[in-house]
Amino acid sequence: MESLDRIDRDILTLLQGEGRLTGAEVGRRVGLSQPAASARIQRLEKNGVITGYRAEVDAAALGLNIHAIIRLRTTHAQLSRALDLASRIPEVVSTLRVTGEDCLIFDVYCPQAGRLEEVVDALARYGPATTSLVLRAYPPKPLTDATSTTT
């Protein structure tokens, strides 16, 4: 894809914060007509820059009161089995394969401590696991901020 200009980046920032904005509202906020804003959004979607739209859900409202991060150190031989298991555990909502001492990081939401213990024990079959409870999650910054050249 060709490089993104300031208006493309502004559109991405807006949609990452409010994915349900109309083309007209996006256009108004970035100084474009509705057709021009909609065309840019469609181009960003077509080129794979915008990969989807989703709802943000409050885990506590679903009874998932424990948010934890589980880091797993495993062997290359066990990696695919650990990934397969994690994909089948509904409480594991995201998985990262990382460099360093740990191999995998799992983002986990559980209704109670007993279920978290079961998840940790299941994953720990594949190597040492370290669990951290999340005290507070802060809103992510839009990805366009990560490409900024100022620090």
Image: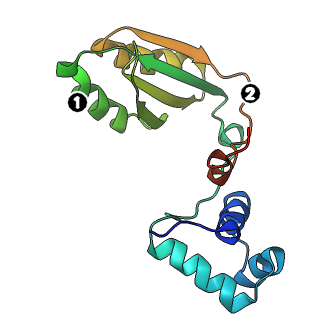
Going 21% across and 20% down the picture, which residue do you hit?
A: 76
Q: In terms of depth relative to the viewer, which is nearer, 141 or 60?
A: 141
Going 58% across and 23% down the picture, which residue do you hit?
A: 68
* Residue 63 visible somewhere in the drawing: yes
In which image quadrant can residue 135 be found?
top right
The x, y position of residue 133, in whole percent, is 63, 18
- Secondary structure under tag 1 reads helix
Q: Which residue sits furthest front? A: 149
Going 46% across and 28% down the picture, which residue do you hit?
A: 106
Q: In terms of depth relative to the viewer, which is nearer, 84 or 143?
A: 143
The x, y position of residue 62, in whole percent, is 65, 42
In which image quadrant can residue 122 be found?
top left
Distance, label 2 to label 1, CA atoms, is 31 Å
Looking at the picture, does residue 142 appear above or below residue 93?
below
Q: In terms of depth relative to the viewer, which is nearer, 134 or 109?
A: 134
Count how many numbered circles sit on residues in the image: 2
**Quadrant position of the N terminus in the picture:** bottom left
The x, y position of residue 79, in whole percent, is 25, 25
Q: Which mark is residue 136?
A: 2
Circle 1 residues within 10 Å: few <14, some 14–19, many ≥20: few
The residue identified by callout 1 is 80
Q: Is 130 situated left or right of 37 in this image?
A: left
Residue type pointed to by label 2: Arg
Looking at the picture, does residue 114 appear above or below residue 95?
above
The x, y position of residue 149, in whole percent, is 67, 46
**Quadrant position of the C terminus in the picture:** top right
Q: Which residue sits furthest left? A: 77
Circle 2 residues within 10 Å: few <14, some 14–19, many ≥20: few
**Sequence-first tag of 2 and 1:** 1
* Residue 19 visible somewhere in the drawing: no
Looking at the picture, does residue 39 appear above or below residue 113?
below
Q: Which residue sits furthest top? A: 128
